[in-house]
Image (cartoon, rainbow, N blue to C red):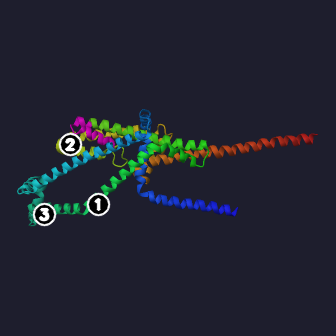
Amino acid sequence: MDRERIIVLFFFGFLAAITFELYQVLYPFLTPIAWAILLAFLAHPGLTQLNRLIKSRTSAAIIITLIVALGVILPAVWLSARLLQEAQNIYSEISRVSTAGGLDKVSDWIRHTHLGASAGAVLARHGIRLEDEILAFWVQGAKLTTAYIIQHGSAVAGNIAILLFHFAVALITFFYLLRDGESYYEALRELTPMHEEDKAAVFDTLRLTLSAVMRGLMLTALLDGVLLGFGYLVAGVPYWAFLAILTAAAGLLPIGGTAIVWIPVVIYLGVGTGWGVAIALAMWAVVTLAVIDNFVKPIAMGHGSGLPTVALFFGLAGGIEAYGPLGIFAGPAVIALFVALLRVYRRAYLRDEGVVIHASQTLARPQRRHRMRFRKE
């Protein structure tokens, strides 16, 4: 017995040590692996339908992986090209202003404003010329901008390289999960030391919760893109269709969300067209998002998960606080698993305890009746 106990302790201690080392190895890639798992879970129905047509699971997984890769790469390349073009236009405009007479025009325009005239009068009383201060401010700003670009340029390039590497890791993981994910799932179920009905309760709860969260996110993101895109179209925003797609994609982000897109659009309209149209678009965005986030999203996410709205709210908020962007899935999943384990405990222990008590009472009663009959005789 002592030898067997030592063997068991050694095995589980060695298993815990290797598990910790495995965690250390996979830690740099946990985020792309988690996103790959969620994307594979989301794309699994499409893989099933495509596999019926192609009859090759590997080919179907390759096609879906390529579609996902192109769906991320092509918009990113297009957006990068647009940003580069806009940056070049801004640089050309700054260079034009910086030429001879450009700063004089800016200074003249500032002096003719009410605030500029007041500031110029105050500075003149102290023997300071407003034109000199504007020129000094412009030169200092150019120096600081150049120094910042030189200092952080290598860091930005390094971050882009890391991002591309993690994207490649996520795509590779996504492909293997699509092709072999079901076998991984069944192996994990078999390794779980629980009764089959308890396994079904836990795994089905997790699956239903993730499906409900993803369905709610996709639905609300689609509504965000359609309704705000309609607002862009009515307001006369250029590239409104692309901005609507970008808004829908930003609606999937737990931090920032659609505000990343529509607030710059409102500012652009205010500066370029007029603040009346910009304020109208901002009001449309606020009202639309308030209705979607407070009514549509909880109903869509709560339907099918079995969680009350308040539990779903704390799962989303606490999950984002604890796990970052992945918390929008991890938070509700943790709460759903906790509820499932409580149900397993109630069914496996409280019910069994009740059965034992009931059996002991039924066994005791015939003995008492037997003793009474014996005394009577």
Which span is picked out in magenta? 231-249
Question: Magenta stretch containing residue 225, yes or no?
Answer: no
Give the farthest residue toward the top.
53
Q: Nearer the viewer, residue 328 or 309?
A: 328
Q: Which residue is mark 3?
A: 136
Please tell me whether residue 144 is drawn above or below residue 41 in the rendered image: below
Left/right placement of residue 64 relative to residue 304 reads left
Q: Tell me the quarter of the image containing the C terminus.
A: top right
Q: Quadrant of residue 340?
A: top right
What amino acid is at disc 1? Ala
What residue is rendered at 64% in x and 61% in y?
A: 7
Q: Quadrant of residue 198?
A: top right
Residue 59 screen position, x and y as percent: 40, 40
What amino acid is at disc 2? Leu
Left/right placement of residue 80 relative to residue 213 reads left
- In space, the residues marked 1 and 3 are separated at their CA atoms by 29 Å
Q: Is residue 20 visible?
A: yes
